[in-house]
Amino acid sequence: MEIQKKKKWRNWTFFIVNVIVVFFLGVLASSINERRSETEMVFKPQVQLTNWEPRNEVWGKNYPREYQSYYETADTTFKSKYNGGATIDMLEVDPRLVVLWAGYGFSKDYNQGRGHVYAVNDIQQTLRTGGPTGADDGPMPGTCWTCKGPDVPRLMDSIGFADFYKGKWAAKGSEIVNPIGCADCHDPETMNLRISRPALIEAFQRQGRKIEEASHQEMRSLVCAQCHVEYYFDKNKIEGVPYLTLPWDNGYSVEAMEEYYDNIEFKDWTHKLSKAPMLKAQHPGYEVYMTGIHADRGVSCADCHMPYKSEGGQKFTDHKIQSPLNNVANSCQVCHRNETEKLIQNVYERQDRIIENRDKLEELVVRAHVEAKFAWDNGATDAQMKDILQDIRHAQWRWDYAAASHGGSFHSPVEIGRVIGTGITVAQEARIKLARLLAELGHNAPIDYPDISTKAKAQAYIGLEMEKLKEEKQLFLINILPKWLEAAALREANY
């Protein structure tokens, strides 16, 4: 009797357990079917996209989650220890930059860039673009639009690369109206990542590589490398056309690109004070990233700056492209099992150490420019100054490479520290040579340095008439912006 009771109890237990298991399996199956239904609903195309559709809001009808997260790049509230999402006048923060860029547009105006959604607006407003009163073409070449939005590949496709690069900046202003977005990185039929700018493809070809063979993970960095790289305008490829080119033929390092530029005797401008043939680093973020530990471990740009997120049962890439420090949980902590405060502290410690030495290099190069001007003013010859000016060129190139690399002090602190260290050595060599030359010219006394403690004082020292420049820019915008808006509205009506 006792055995029968136990057997009966086991049967009931087995039955109840099976009922529970079947219930939860049913719930799981229902959830899977629901998620599949959501997937089918979300990815059912609402509109047919043309090959170079530039309007992000049209893409957003098919991909609403990505579209909504992209427009969160309009958020300017995030602020870290160094910079953040808001506009920051970097010349106000560090007036020495005015002297470093004397004779170049950056000495007039240099603001920290905001999110991608502001790309078109910010280039329209900066004093580096636009021209004197009544000039509709502006001083900058049309090539300066290359990274500002998906209207660029649309135009390149319709008129060709060379014709896009021809002419002045304002001549194409009525065409470039959509900010950086979907068509810059995605194929509209497959949504696969694609390269839409020729410079990166051509740089790979010159290295004997095929960008089509890049893996999906590599492409999650290469689409960023279309713009976040060092580049220059090659006017020899097509006579007179400022053809955008990446100087990677010798490699990605600061020395390799320096050698490339020296061999072709390229300069971005002649420094107004020292007369040195200068190089302006653009933003070699990809090159610096390639030397860091994250690239070595296969981590892409998107893994940190566009991490995956889930919403409504859907996993997708967050297109709020931003600092990982504003999204530590989805970026850093996917791999690093540390508290948020500790991870941010680690970043700031690296930035502090790099910036401390970078500021020292900056000070040395500023002094070298001032001392070189003093040498010229006191009778130095071209032959006497040649090697000195080359040292100044190389020292500032290293400073700019470190300063303009967009997070380089975190992406690759060891390499950036090395670059700054070699820059300090080169800058000191230039100043030693200047001291010897000045002694030969009969000047052994200390040189009086200008008061450049504010942006206004530094700009006055290099001879900029800022009020006049601001008035001219305002008149330029009043004259040209209505024409651009009218042309853009007409084109929109014809779609």
Image (cartoon, helix red, strand yellow):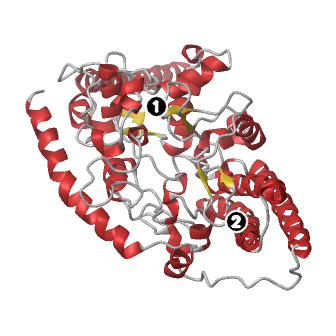
- Image position, residue 300 (x, y; %): 59, 35
Question: Callout 1 environment at 10 Å: few (<14), some (14 to 19), or many (20+)?
Answer: many
Secondary structure of residue under mark 2: helix
Give 13 or 345, whichever is nearer the viewer.
345
First in sequence: mark 1 or mark 2?
A: 1
Residue for badge 2: 355
Single out the mark in the foreground, 1 or 2: 1
Between the residue at mark 1 and the residue at mark 2, the CA separation in whole angstroms equals 37 Å
* Residue type highlighted by circle 2: Ile
Vertically, is 185 above or below 408?
above
* Residue type highlighted by circle 1: Val
Give 12 or 397, whichever is nearer the viewer.
397
Q: Classify the position of the C terminus by image quarter.
A: top left
Quadrant hosting residue 317: top left
Question: Callout 2 environment at 10 Å: few (<14), some (14 to 19), or many (20+)?
Answer: some
Give 89 or 137, whichever is nearer the viewer.
137
- Along the horizontal axis of the image, is 175 left or right of 427? left
Secondary structure of residue under mark 1: loop
Residue for badge 1: 241
- Along the horizontal axis of the image, is 97 left or right of 240? right
Quadrant hosting residue 184: top left
- Along the horizontal axis of the image, is 364 left or right of 78? right
- Image position, residue 474 (x, y; %): 26, 65
Residue depicted at 74% across the width and 34% down the height: 263
